[in-house]
């Protein structure tokens, strides 16, 4: 909602600032989707850039790989969370992260009919007890 300031709701009804997190991770918005995210949140007074990373951008080298607009949101999310972020949390390098597993609901029928592809995002706030 407009006028929300820099606070944004997270699961459980709490309100946090982006800088309350060691990182905010999206699944695979890619470079284009990340810029759109910054623009939409910026219009509402929220600057995510200092803490945001996109799992797809972390996995792929856009200079050397021809990935265009991205890859699999669920694949990128799972790979980065399980292969990187949880280990960093176990070592105490990350204490609190907001993990936003983004993806597209692909439907061959919708695509053939020229309909838009809906997106989905499951949000988890992960907090280390260490």
Image: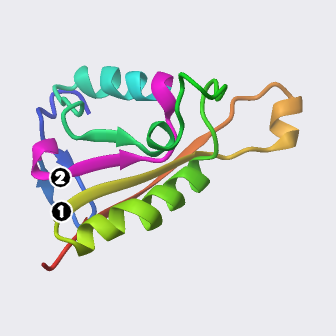
Q: Which residue is mark 1?
A: 93
- Going by the picture, which residue comes out furthest to the bottom? 129
**Is the C-beta separation of discs 2 and 1 under 8 Å?**
yes
Q: If the image is split into quadrants, where does the N terminus sit?
A: top left
Q: Give the side of residue 34 with respect to residue 95, left or right.
A: right
Q: If the image is split into quadrants, where does the C terminus sit?
A: bottom left
Q: Give the side of residue 88 with respect to residue 15, left or right.
A: right
Q: Element under label 2?
A: loop
Q: Check if residue 24 falls in the magenta segment.
A: yes
Q: Give the side of residue 107 with respect to residue 21, left or right.
A: right
Which of 59 and 36 lies nearest the eye of the viewer?
59
Q: Residue at x 21, y 26 (%)?
A: 44
Q: Which residue is mark 2?
A: 22
Task: Name above or below for residue 27 compared with residue 30.
Answer: below
What is the quadrant of residue 36 in the picture? Answer: top left
The numbered mark, 2 or 1, whose residue comes first in the sequence reads: 2
Q: Position of residue 65 (x, y in %)?
A: 63, 29
Q: Residue at x 12, y 35 (%)?
A: 6
What is the C-alpha distance between the residues marked 2 and 1? 9 Å
Magenta residues span: 17-32
Badge nearest the viewer, 2 or 1: 1
Q: Position of residue 101 (x, y in %)?
A: 47, 53
Task: Name above or below for residue 122 compared with residue 1.
Answer: below
Q: Check if residue 51 falls in the magenta segment.
A: no
Q: Residue at x 52, y 59 (%)?
A: 79
Task: Name above or below for residue 119 compared with residue 121.
Answer: above
Q: Residue at x 16, y 43 (%)?
A: 18
């Amino acid at each position: 909602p407009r006028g929300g300031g820099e606070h944004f709701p997270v699961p459980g009804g709490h309100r946090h600032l982006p800088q309350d997190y060691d990182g905010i991770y999206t699944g695979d918005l890619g470079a284009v989707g990340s810029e759109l995210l910054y623009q939409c949140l910026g219009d509402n007074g929220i600057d995510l850039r200092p803490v945001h990373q996109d799992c797809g951008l972390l996995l792929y080298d856009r200079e050397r790989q021809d990935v265009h607009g991205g890859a699999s949101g669920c694949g990128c999310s799972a790979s980065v969370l399980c292969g990187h972020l949880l280990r960093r949390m176990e070592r105490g390098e990350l204490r609190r992260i907001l993990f936003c597993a983004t993806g597209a609901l692909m439907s061959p029928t919708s695509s053939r009919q020229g309909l838009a592809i809906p997106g989905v995002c499951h949000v988890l706030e992960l907090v280390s007890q260490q």
